[in-house]
Amino acid sequence: EFSEISLKDIDQLASSSFPLCMRHLFDKLRENHHLKHGGRMQLGLFLKAVGLKLEDALAFWKSEFSQKVGAERFDKEYSYSIRHNYGKEGKRTDYTPYACHKIISSTPSVGDHHGCPYRHFRLVDLFNQKSDVLYFLVFIYYNSAMHTIHCESIRAAQKSIVHMLQIFCFSIIVVCNCHSLFNSEENLRAALGKMGVGGRSLDDILDKVRSRHYQVACTLTFEAVHAASCDSGINHPNQYFEASQKTLQ
Ligand code: SF4
C-alpha cells in the first residue's frame, strides 16, 4: 500500500498517475455511472491498494451508481461486494489487486471495460465483431454463387450476377463504414492521445502492441507520459501508480 488518498483528489490522480487500464475503467464509470463485475473488481481493488479507504470507496461508487440504479439499489446490491473486497464481509479475506499478467489474460466480453487496453482494445474488435461481419458476407456470396451456378436460363443467370454485384457494392459500403469501429488500433491511438502521447513514442508503443508485448507498451507509455525512464518495466498497475507518484513529487 502506498499511502492514503483523498476522494477529492481522485480525478486528478486518475489523469496524472493511473495506467491506461485503470484510466479506461475510471472514464467509463464516470461516463456510464456503471461498471460490470469484472470492471468493479479490477478498479475497486486497484483503488483500495492505492490508498482509498473503505468509507471513501463506498462514497465514490455510490456517487456514480446511484445516478444509474438509485441509491437504494446501490446499498442493497453493490455495497456488499465493496465491503467484501475490503475484507469486511464473508470470509473476511483482504483481497489483493490484480497484477498485469492476470489482467492481460482475462477475457472481457462485449460491454465489459476491464482487461488491458493494449491487448483487449485489439482483440475484442478484431476477433469478435469483424469476424461476425465476414461470416455474414461469405454466407451471402456463397448463396448467390450457388444460385448463379444452378440457373436454368441465361436471363436468370444475368439477373443473379447483377444481384451479386449489388451485394458486392453493399459490402464495400459496410466495410468502409465499419472501418473505424473495427480498427481498434485507432481506439488505442485515441486513448494514448488523451494521455498526451504522440509522435515517435506513439509509433513505438503501437509496434510493441503489434508484436504482443503489452507490458513493454505500457512501460513505454509510462516513460512518454512522465518523461522519465522505468528500468524495471511495468508488471502491476499499482506499481505504475507508485512509480508515477514518485516521479511527480
Ligand atoms: Fe494495466 Fe498492466 Fe496493461 Fe499497463 S500493462 S495497462 S498496468 S494491465
Image: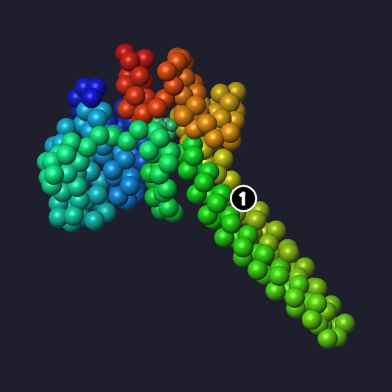
Percent across and percent down for residue 114 are 38, 44
| 217 up-or-down from 106: above or below | above
Q: Quadrant of ligand 1?
A: top left
Q: Tell me, what colour scheme is on the image?
A: rainbow
The reply to whether residue 171 is visible in this rendering is yes
Percent across and percent down for residue 191 are 48, 36
Residue 144 image-quadrant placement: bottom right
Quadrant (top left, top right, bottom left, bottom right) of the N terminus: top left
Name the residue at the bottom extreme.
152
Percent across and percent down for residue 216 are 50, 26
* Residue located at (52% from left, 54% from top): 128
The amino acid at mark 1 is His
* Residue located at (37% from left, 25% from top): 240
Quadrant (top left, top right, bottom left, bottom right) of the C terminus: top left
Ligand 1 lies under 8 Å from the Cβ of mark 1: no
Lateral position of residue 154 relative to residue 199, left or right = right
Lateral position of residue 92 relative to residue 199, left or right = left
* Residue located at (43% from left, 41% from top): 105
Residue 139 image-quadrant placement: bottom right
* Residue located at (36% from left, 20% from top): 244
Name the residue at the right extreme.
154
The residue wearing badge 1 is 179
Query: Label 1 crowding class (10 Å Cα cut-off): few <14, some 14-19, many 20+?
Result: few
Between 48 and 87, which is closer to the camera in this rendering? 87
Percent across and percent down for residue 36 are 32, 51
How many labels, in total? Answer: 1
Helix, strand or loop at disc 1?
A: helix
| 123 up-or-down from 51: above or below | below
| 249 up-or-down from 198: above or below | above
The reply to whether residue 59 is visible in this rendering is no
